[in-house]
Amino acid sequence: MLNNYTAQTRIGVIAGGFSGERPVSLRSGKNVLAALQRKGYNARLIDPVDTDISADTMDIAFLCLHGQFGEDGCIQAQLAHVGIPYTGSGTQASILGMNKLVTKTIMVANGLPTPAFQVITTTPFTLDLPLPVIVKPIAEGSSLGVFIADTWEDCQARVTTILDKYGICLIEEYIAGRELTVGVLDNHGDLQALPILELKPDNRFYDYDAKYTPGKTTFILPAPLPTTVRDELHAHAIKLHTVLGCSGATRTDMLLHEEKGPFLLEINTAPGMTDQSDLPAQAAAAGISFDDLVEIILCSASSEK
Ligand SMILES: Nc1ncnc2c1ncn2[C@@H]1O[C@H](COP(=O)(O)OP(=O)(O)O)[C@@H](O)[C@H]1O
Ligand SMILES: [Mg+2]
């Protein structure tokens, strides 16, 4: 157990919640709870659906929520308001990281490579990018609503669907590249980039089906990459984590094009902690056990972010 915690320190593992990623969050939460208990901490699971988030029930919050009201800054603002230190990124970094348009704008401003893009808010529109293109919502996850459009008709139809649902749509240059994800861990004040995970989906891209159907994606860890490329990708992930002001652990999704090099797609500020999740696998490849990973993330708990 860490020095500044006692058996009386009550850790609330916040999991479940209101988003579509509720089942994944519950699986993350149960794993984290078990790890904390194995380490001797006084922890219990708290689901915002049926329990008030208040200082009466916990001294520290270990956040295992994903998606809306979980990683978008809302729960972070609520915890800050009631004065409970919490793990992971703060309110502002969570808001920035949840919005792909904002994240990409910050990438461009900081010289980080990201696919060329345009934002559509009304129809009709003109396409400024060559086909095929990727059409996606600005603040979703799990590849929900992400499509490849091979034709102008397809592009218009996909954009219209996304505009009807979200009111704003992102179109990106399609990058035919290797799918990589890079974890960054704030390890007691040192930002540590973890071994890079390569994902080879059977499908044309890493869509919802490839993400959640066992056997539809091959995982390669560590991804076979020349050291210089690996170092470059690590530096990019650390830089994005830093310029967004993230805390705790993050995971940055990238595509690596054979000639054009890397392109950063997005950052995940609340990476999953299930048995199948990427971050624990990347940590394990770096020699960090799940229980140690949980304890390192616990150290990111603070009320000032
Ligand atoms: N510009 C792009 N070019 C090629 N494939 C892309 C592009 N953008 C997204 N994809 C594919 O869609 C997947 C999901 O996109 P991403 O932006 O990471 O959104 P999500 O938040 O839903 O994970 C990516 O992992 C990749 O397989
Ligand atoms: Mg992604």
Image (cartoon, rainbow, N blue to C red):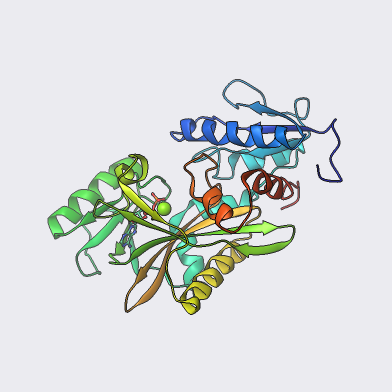
For the N terminus, the quadrant is: top right
Say if residue 110 shows up in the picture.
no
Residue 5: percent from left, percent from top: 84, 40
Considering depth in this image, is 11 or 94 the residue closer to the camera? 11
Residue 45 against residue 167 in the figure, above or below: above
Residue 301: percent from left, percent from top: 73, 46
Residue drawn at (63%, 37%) of the image: 32
Residue drawn at (30%, 42%) of the image: 209
Q: Is residue 170 left or right of residue 247?
A: left
Say if residue 139 shows up in the picture.
yes
Which quadrant of the structure image shows residue 215? top left
Residue 182 against residue 144 in the figure, above or below: below
Total numbered labels placed on residues in the image: 0
Residue 47: percent from left, percent from top: 60, 26
Residue drawn at (39%, 45%) of the image: 142
Residue 254 against residue 109 in the figure, above or below: above
Considering depth in this image, is 237 or 122 the residue closer to the camera? 237
Considering depth in this image, is 137 or 239 the residue closer to the camera? 239
Q: Is residue 172 left or right of residue 107?
A: left
Residue 117: percent from left, percent from top: 34, 66
Residue drawn at (32%, 75%) of the image: 258
